[in-house]
Amino acid sequence: MGHYIREYWLSEGDGMTRRDRRGCEYAAYVPDPIAGATFTFDGETAADVSDAELAIIRLNAQSTSLASTEAIARLLLRAEAVASSWIEGLEVGAGRVLRAEAAREFEDRGRADVTAEEVLGNIDAMSEALAAADTESEITVETILEIHRRLLAPTRLAEHAGRIREVQNWVGGSAYNPCSAAFIPPPPSEVLALLEDLAAFCNEDLLSPVAQAAIAHAQFETIHPFVDGNGRTGRALIHLILRRRGLAPRVVPPVSLVLATLSRDYIEGLTAFRYEGIPGSDAAIDGVNRWVALFGAACARAVRDAEEFEERVDALKYAWRSRLGKVRSGSSANLMVELLPGTPMVTATSAAKLLGRTFKATNRAIALLQEKGVLRQVTVGRRNKAFEATEAIAAFTSLERQLASPADNTLSSPPTRPVPARRQGEGA
């Protein structure tokens, strides 16, 4: 049964205020195991889950720009990873992340953008989750640790990467003690067993994929198994489950960012999920239903945002082709029009590799796209030359802002969390 373990906190260390040094009794929450558990959904929750799954199926079956190439799917993944990092206080725009990504090609570490590198770690973690779903027969604790390892490896907290916490952590309140915390996860002695149970649940197929992803995410955030990076790892876990269950084989909608936008409802939903008592109690059933219904609605909204983004990408490609005029359908320039929305910053070498064309042909295409205002030259690292599709980056930024607006439009409904600034002339 979901229950609390009461402990006493003794503060240590100098240089703290009396308030920070004080001791207190605190209650750490230990959730029920979920592997093999039975969950009861009411009619409205079941309908929300069904609507979400139909929307995700439609997105994967009908989308062209988003799913016809890996590049566009990566862009949507990058949108989630970048905005997810904004949620965690890593405030960096898409342009900086793309420059840092390009700098990797040159192995130019002399002027490394530390914040952008942390966001790239988040993208690596998301990619690792999807790769695990495609290549591993089962999700294990090690799968989750590897996602976390990829996330923290390029950060100042690399020593904690892929390691289960050995200390008590908490959410909210003071940085020095849990006395005023909003939520206190299980003691470290409980974490490994709970992670093993979570992994076993992730390998089941007793529930629909959306309901399974919802419960797995809530359970992970309740366990809070790491010193840092729990939110980003928990969001990657959603991708892992939706891909593994075959619901989103090509495109995973950015559902976790919608949840972050609905932050008050998100916290209330997680709080309701953390019932005290037996799993079949009214409080337990109601709490799980509230959370799963919210998650299902967020999935449906994420699909709508992804579909609108696809329309933007299609319009952008049409505008670029209009500028180019008559070019052969199989020409390097025409192929780059397809490439750029998903890879809006390239070098001559990376573009040639992605296009499967010679360096000379690729350079000619880049020169033509520069002439027509599709690409502009930028410098990455110390003095390395790259080319960016500014309009594609603007569309990406607009998506980030839209995902942060409760009403899908930041002009009428301001963002509820930090997002990149809107450039002059952009609509939302």
Image (spheres, helix red, strand yellow):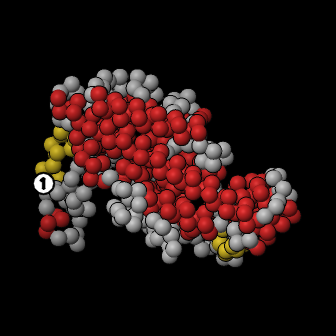
Q: Residue at x 76, y 55 (%)?
A: 335
- Observer-nearest residue: 409 or 238? 409
What residue is drawn where x is 20% and y is 36%?
275
> Of 6 and 266, which appears nearest the observer?
266
Task: Identify which amino acid the numbered label 1 is placed on.
Answer: Cys
Residue ID for mark 1: 24
From the top left corner, tell me how far across and down residue 278 is, in percent: 19, 27
Q: Nearer the viewer, residue 87 or 49?
A: 49
The quadrant of the rendering that contains the N terminus is top left
Residue occupying the point 60% across, 74% down = 111
In the image, residue 421 lies at what x, y percent? 45, 71
Q: Is residue 388 left or right of residue 331?
A: left
**Among the 4 quarters of the image, the one containing residue 369:** bottom right
Task: Say whether residue 328 is left or right of residue 48.
Answer: right
Quadrant of residue 3 within the rendered picture: top left
Residue 395 versus residue 248 in the image, above or below: below
The relative height of residue 358 versus residue 147 in the rendered view (above or below) is: below
Is residue 99 toward the left or the right of residue 259 in the image? right
Residue 192: percent from the left, percent from the top?
36, 37
Density class for disc 1 (Cα within 10 Å; few <14, some 14-19, many ≥20) is some
Would residue 199 be visible to someone looking at this image? no
Q: Position of residue 377 (x, y in %)?
A: 70, 74
Judging depth in this view, the residue of 226 and 54 nearest the camera is 54
Residue at x 23%, y 44% (from the top left corner) = 271
Note whether residue 396 is visible: yes
